[in-house]
Structures are given as C-alpha cells and as structure tokens.
Amino acid sequence: MLPRAPLPNNSRILTESFVRPIGCLRGLTMPILAVVICTVAALYPAYAQVYRVQEMNTTQIQSLDRLHTAAILVGGILEEHGPYLPSYTDGYVNEYIAQQVANAIAARPGWKVLMFPPIPLGTSGANDIPGKLRFPGTYDARESTLRAIFVDLASDLGDQGFRWIFVFHGHGAPTHRRALDEAASYFRAKYKGHMVNLWEISPPEEIERLQALIAAHGLDYSSEEGFSIHAGAIETSRLISVRPDLADPAYKGAHPLTGRTFSDLRRIGAASDWPGYFGSPRLSSKEFGDDWMRIVAQTEAEYALKILDGLDEQSVPQPKLFSGFFGFVLSPAFLWLIFALSLLWLLLVAHSMFRFREWRQMLGKQVDSVQKLLFRHILPPLLGVLAAISTVWILLRFGYTLWMLTLPPDSSYVLLLLACVTLLFALAKLITVAVVLVTARKSLT
C-alpha cells in the first residue's frame, strides 16, 4: 500500500475543521454525526490522492503506479502587470486551475496526481510588445532555456516510467507556447506518452462560452476594454477571483488605455509613461473572474479526463502560434534553412581561407582593373561587414550578448557565430586588398 504523503494545506484545514469539534458533538444526534463523518469520508480521498513531490521521499515516489499517475507541471512567467497586479499573476491563475484539474483526476478510482512545485519562468513578457525589453517586474528567460527545463523534467519523468504529464503554464507569447509545445512533442516522440499544455487546448465549446461571457459583461473589442491582452479588465478579474488580496484597490480608478489592434498596443506601450497594462482594469469584477475561472477549469478538467481515456490531444483544436511570413520566419523549417545556409557559408569561408595565398596572387594581377577590384574584392566584404554588424546589433537589441557563444547552440548561437565569422573574413579581405594596393603603388613608384 502506498505510504500516504503529507496532505496539502487545504486538506489539513478541511480535516482539522471536522476533527477538532468532535468533543463538542456529544450533545448532537447520531444522524448529524453520521452526515459529518460521511462528508469527510467523501471529500478526503480526492485530496489524499494529490501528492506533492517536494513532500515525498524515494519510497513513496517509487510506490506510485506509473500508468495511473498523472504528473502536473505548473508555473507562470514573472511578468510585469502594471501598478495593480503582481508579477506572478499568470502563475496564480495557472496554480488555481491546475489544482481543480488535479482534484478531478484524483477523484477517479485508482488515479493519483503528482504535483510539482511552481516553475516561475517564462519567455517574452508583454513589455516586449512596444520593444521595452527591460521593465520592472519582468524577469524572463530565453525560449531555449524554457524548452530545456521542460524537456529535462519530462525526460526525468519518462525515464522513471511516468507516461502522463499535464502542463499548466499559460502565457500568451508565441515563443513561450512554442517552447512548451516542443517539449511536449519530444516527450511523446521519445516515451510514447502524453504531455499536454492544457492551456493550449481551445475546444470550440470553451471559446464560445468565454466569448458569450465577455459579451455579457460588455468587455468585447467595441468597449472601453478594447483589444486588451494584458492586465486589463479580463486579467484583473481573473486575479481578484483567485488572489484578491494581491490586487491593488487603486485599479478601480485606473485610466483606460484602449487599443483596437496590435499596432495600437505597440503605440500605447511606446509612451514613456506607459504603466504596463492595456485596456481598462476599472471594469473588472470578481463575478466575471469567478465565471471565467469556472469555465476554464471545468473545460480543462473534462479534457484531461478525456485524454486519460484515450483522446489524442493533438486532435483537439489549438490556436495557431504564427501565420503568414512571420510564421515561416519563426517556424522549424526556417531554422533548418538557416542551419543549412550557415553550414554552406562556413564551408565556403574555410575553402577560401585554405586558398588564401592563391587568392592574394590573383588579386595582385587584377589591381590595375578598377571595376574588378571594386565589384569583386571591395564591395562584397563591405556588404559582409554591414550584414554582420546589423545582425549583431539586432541580437543585442533583443537581449543577446557575445558571451552566449559559450552556451549550447540554438538559433541565436548560429546567427552570432555567422556574424562573427563573416565580420572577421570580410575584414581580412579588406586588409589584404589594402596591402596589395599599397604594395602595387610602391612597386610603381
């Protein structure tokens, strides 16, 4: 029999609230006492089957039935949410929904849940929208870092025999969601199990219910809330539903920052005094937040149980991360194209360097041809210098630094490496051209 791990705090409170008054129940009738005992017996097993890995020892973890235990990875990005909401707003919402789904799974006979501590990491905060990459309250990680963390945790669980992983790490940034999706794909491919970021599942019935809820509360695009994707009335309502103690009451007098399009949001966020939110937090309500959380928690619990019953999570409609040219640029196909072109370019550079002496002699013969000298030997390396400097500048603008070349390769690593190689090779060619011209001039004089 599985040794029982320490109960979650809510279970202790629930149990103590019934156990302590037992001494005072002597005067009550037996039927009332029976009702109380039956209520505790009905509620306790559901909570008792939710185990927290940080509270368990090796023996307890080894005793879990791998095929009937769902591991839950929960967390949220540390991201600025303006002056009224905490930076871990996403995390509090994710933790609440994860707990509801965990309770639903644990209520099934024979099923248990292994909850992991929250992971407060994510990539690309909302302050990236107007290009403000450093903003108080946002402490994000690179996409490759986030992906590596979830791949590593999935590998640990997979190697230990677990085959069911549910992730609750909702955040709107496409790069954030892509990192989690790629980790899930890795787990499914290697361990033939199921790893699902339930926040990404958007079945039609959930979307319709949420849209109806938004319309009922007057928070659609035509309202003061507008196209609000961050810290507006909708997100503030969710936070005050689960952690009202962390919302600054001043949100009730917040000035609306209404946008209708993504371009509007960039314009609003570009202002020097942008407070860090979009929309109208003053339209928030606990009632709306409670309804929203109930719909999402119910839907995700339903689909978690369906997946345990055999539903292929990849068959459930999911929002498209990227579209159009931007989608191609950030797609895996584009990254493979970059890698292929990078390898070809490095081979060409290496080939040229091995023929450096022969190439210099050829250059000396063409020194009297201004056209050949300009278009074959001066203009190309100048363009190479410009391209390399532009690439480095863009990467630095987005938070990358040259010391990252010491880290495991990713797309930024390749681009930085290419830029550096191109810059060195172009400068070497320009210096050689200068040396040849100086030498030719001396020989003429």
Image (cartoon, helix red, strand yellow):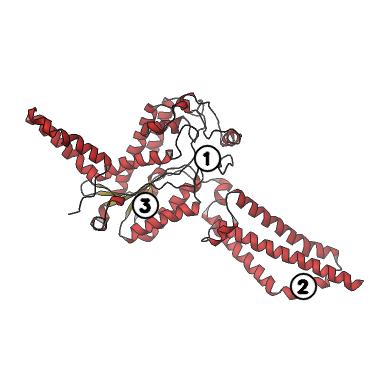
Q: Between label 2 and label 1, give the one nearer the viewer.
A: 1
Tell me: residue 76, above or below residue 295: below
| Numbered circle sitting on residue 360 | 2
Earlier in the chain: of badge 3 and badge 2, it is 3
Q: Which amino acid does label 2 sit on?
A: Arg
| Numbered circle sitting on residue 346 | none
Give the mark count.
Answer: 3
Looking at the picture, tell me which residue is in the foreground, 146 or 3.
3
Q: Answer with the quarter of the image where residue 273 lies.
A: top right
Query: What residue is shown with label 1?
Result: 136
Q: Could you give the CA–CA distance between mark 3 and mark 2, rounded to whole angstroms?
A: 57 Å
Looking at the picture, tell me which residue is in the foreground, 108 or 272.
272
Q: Answer with the quarter of the image where residue 209 lies.
A: top left
Earlier in the chain: of badge 3 and badge 1, it is 1
Residue 199, given in percent of the width and then of the height, sits at 40, 43
- The answer to whether mark 3 and mark 1 are in CB contact below 8 A is no
Residue 353, given in percent of the width and then of the height, sits at 68, 71
Q: Between label 3 and label 1, give the one nearer the viewer.
A: 1
Q: Which amino acid does label 3 sit on?
A: Met
Residue found at the very far right of the displayed protein:
445
- In the structure shown, which secondary structural element does the residue marked by tag 2 occupy? helix
- In the structure shown, which secondary structural element does the residue marked by tag 3 occupy? strand
Residue 395, given in percent of the width and then of the height, sits at 60, 52
**214 horizontally vs 44: left or right:** right
- In the structure shown, which secondary structural element does the residue marked by tag 1 occupy? loop
Query: What residue is shown with label 3?
Result: 195
Q: Between label 3 and label 2, give the one nearer the viewer.
A: 2
Q: In which quarter of the image is the N terminus?
A: bottom left
Q: How crowded is mark 2: few (under 14 residues within 10 Å), some or many (20 or more)?
A: some
- The answer to whether mark 2 and mark 1 are in CB contact below 8 A is no
**35 horizontally vs 443: left or right:** left
